[in-house]
Image: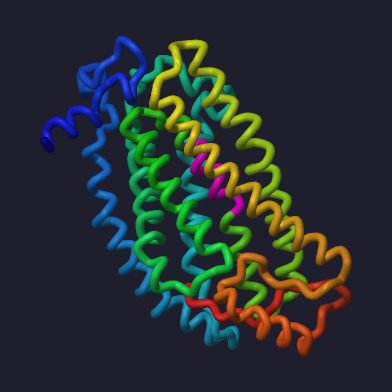
Amino acid sequence: MFQTLYSAFWWERLWLPANLTWADLRDRDGRVYAKAADLYVTLPLALLFLVVRHLFETYVATPLAGLLNVKEKISWRFTFYLIAFIAGMAVIVDKPWFYDLREVWKGYPIQSMLPSQYWYYMIELSFYWSLLFSVASDVKRKDFKEQIVHHVATIILISFSWFTNYIRAGTLIMALHDSSDYLLESAKMFNYAGWRNTCNNIFIVFAAVFIITRLVILPFWIMHCTLVYPLELYPAFFGYYFFNGMMAVLQALHVFWAFLIIRMAHKFITGKVVEDERSDREETDNSEEEEEGTKNGPLSNGHPVLNNNHRKTD
């Protein structure tokens, strides 16, 4: 029974274009290809990430928060996202498919794997596993359910793109997502430290980068690349629909979060009290936050600010 299900799941017609088999992706002549078994290492690496996070928050974030006289510690995600973005750009910036998206599919799926691509994938996937593992212990955000969907969809997309050799497209998508995340986390750090003007300015930059990358570049360049260009080479197959379906799920989440970001920007413009729309508090704490926000006042040096009364344990 198990063998039957296993064989059905790995049937080539599900995941590969017509006339291609898994045998075509076996290592040969010094060329190494991605394999599903490579992903097993991401589970122990995810646990290692949790250990590193604990050590980082204990010996780096907590002393730093003490120096700044704040309780919240969110520098772990900022540190990872910044390093991941820099590393991701280093992986793709010298590749031809970074400048010409048609190169993403040149020779597909017979595209050998580079060591830099291997480590970029393993680290990114391990990190998202660690986020999923720790979600129950982290303070819930208002968009808790959307975060769960996002983490699961991301893990599925990264895993699928790996074993079906969508690696070139995958590296572009991961770097695109990392390009704005570290800005949001840095804005939160300055907010909690009381550097409100700096926080506001970084948030504006974050909003612009988020909207450009996830509502313009991702749907009109990257998704166009994954939807249109493959059909010029082979007929659509299940894996093609599956990958782009998961991309559509992520894009729907981006639209949802963009709505929250734009709503915050509107509050900046109108001078209303502003709090992080993706607050790290439970939704049941909203009334308390609003009362505290009113006491603090809506403006700092003439500008509306992010509410500085969040409890953050990240």
The vertical placement of 249 against 20, above or below, is: below
**Image position of 130 (left or right of 217):** left
Quadrant location of the N terminus? top left
Residue 12: quadrant of the picture: top left
Colouring method of the image: rainbow
Q: Nearer the viewer, residue 184 or 243?
A: 243
**Image position of 137 (left or right of 104):** left
Q: Residue at x 51, y 37 (%)?
A: 247
The part of the chain drawn in magenta is: 171-180
| Main secondary-structure element of the magenta-colored stretch | helix
Q: Residue furthest front?
A: 1
Q: Nearer the viewer, residue 104 or 286?
A: 286
Residue 3: quadrant of the picture: top left
Q: How many marks?
A: 0
Q: Is residue 174 magenta?
A: yes
Q: Residue at x 75, y 63 (%)?
A: 264
**Image position of 292 (left or right of 192):** right
Q: Position of residue 206 (x, y in %)?
A: 68, 56
**Image position of 302 (left or right of 246):** right
The vertical placement of 101 against 127, above or below, is: above
Residue 176: quadrant of the picture: top right
Q: Residue at x 58, y 79 (%)?
A: 284
Q: Position of residue 292 (x, y in %)?
A: 71, 87
Q: Is residue 75 magenta?
A: no
Q: Position of residue 314 (x, y in %)?
A: 48, 72
Q: Position of residue 225 (x, y in %)?
A: 56, 25
Q: Residue at x 39, y 69 (%)?
A: 136
